[in-house]
Image: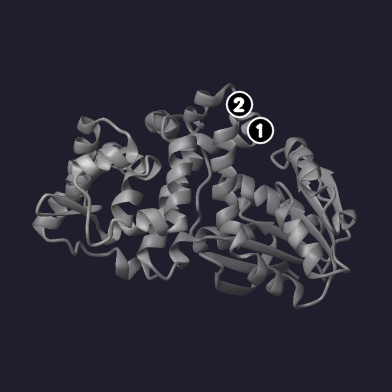
Amino acid sequence: MDVEKDFAEDRMGAYEAQKTAHWISQGPVIFQVARFMVKSGLLEKVSDSGEKGLTIDEAVAACSLPRYGVQVLFESSLTMGILLYREGRFYCSKAGWFLLNDEMVRVDMDFNHDVNYIGMFNLEEAIREGKPAGLRHFGDWKTIYEALPHLPEEVKKSWFAFDHYYSDHSFSEALAVLMHRGGKNILDVGGNTGRFALEAVAYDKDAQVTVMDLPGQIEMMRNAVAGSEGNGRIHAYPADLLDEGTVFPSGFDKIWMSQFLDCFGTEEVVSILSRAAASMSDETELYIMESFWDRQPYGTAAFALTAISLYFTVMANGNSKMYGYSDMLECVERAGLKVDERIDNVGKCHTILICSKKQ
């Protein structure tokens, strides 16, 4: 993606521009209609009908919903473009097919509904105050990371499905990068529930992984890896990484930060990287894996990632985002590190930066 090229000019005609503006104004309605079409099974029933299609009455019988409800959902879905209509019968469109079958779409939809939707009403306050104003919907918490162990089960399920989807698809490629230059002793910073640590000790039978994260996350990690093969080579280092007095443990060959730094504001990123750098020897490598919105090959991915930034604004902590590459490069250099290698297109949408201490 070339930001200067792709976003420099307005390529929309007047009709397309007006249509886009109307789509934006009806965004909350469009989202909830599409979500319920999927959740209720209506869209699946229409899709399964294939070239035969369904009438409204047939859809009512198939899903046991009121006729009025099916009618308004179908009419809205028709004008949204997820259904087609011929001779009294409704058919699934290509966009409808992707709503049903694109895993990323489904994960994002559940995440936005369960985690973000109500809180997004407080976007203006979050922007003005620099605090996650929408998080109060779930209780009195400073950040969502502290709240995570205490969130309702359905919310946790959608949060972890979202988090794991974007990371799990990159594990095999990421581990090949991480392990290819030797070094078996790894510090996994922000290791969350230990999924990457488990993959790492399975990938290399000599690997030792220490997960550094908040005490609440460490407890979840311990429970998650208990009884798993290789769990004896997974260790814990509970720490509040926002506390500038928190010192990184030393003696590691590699420091791994995956989808971690996007959880912090710029100055916090610099602080975390600076403390990591202080713990590093000249031989230690620091790996940063992030989804930089301006390193995506397609505009759809950039669109999704910049939208995710608003989750951080309103729900997570009020000051972080999905970073652009140039922003992260500046943070790395301010922390006394340098990027030795950049590897794009890892997994779904990630870039890995391999860093070392400046000499």
Where does the C terminus fall, quadrant-wise? bottom right
Residue 120's label in the rendered image is none
* Pointer 2 with pointer 1, Cβ within 8 A: yes
Say which quadrant the N terminus sits in.
Answer: bottom left
- The residues tagged by marks 2 and 1 sit, at their Cα atoms, a distance apart of 7 Å
Q: Which residue is mark 1?
A: 146
Q: Tag 2, which secondary structure?
A: loop
Q: Nearer the viewer, residue 144 or 95?
A: 95
Residue lying at 44% horizontally and 67% vertically, measured from the top left? 296
Q: For numbered disc 1, what is the local secondary structure? A: helix
Q: Amino acid at mark 2?
A: Trp
Question: Residue 183 appears at what percent x and percent y?
Answer: 84, 71
* Left or right: residue 295 compared with residue 151: left
Label 2, on which residue? 141
Residue pictured at 54% horizontal, 42% vertical: 158
Above/below status of 246 relative to 235: above
In the image, is 129 to the left or to the right of 192?
left
Please provide percent x and percent y for residue 262. 57, 50
Kindly identify the amino acid type of the residue bearing the numbered disc 1: Glu
The mark total stands at 2
**Number of residues whose C-alpha sits closer than 10 Å to that of mark 2, classed few (under 14), some (14–19) or many (20 or more):** some
**Left or right: 249 in relation to 144:** right
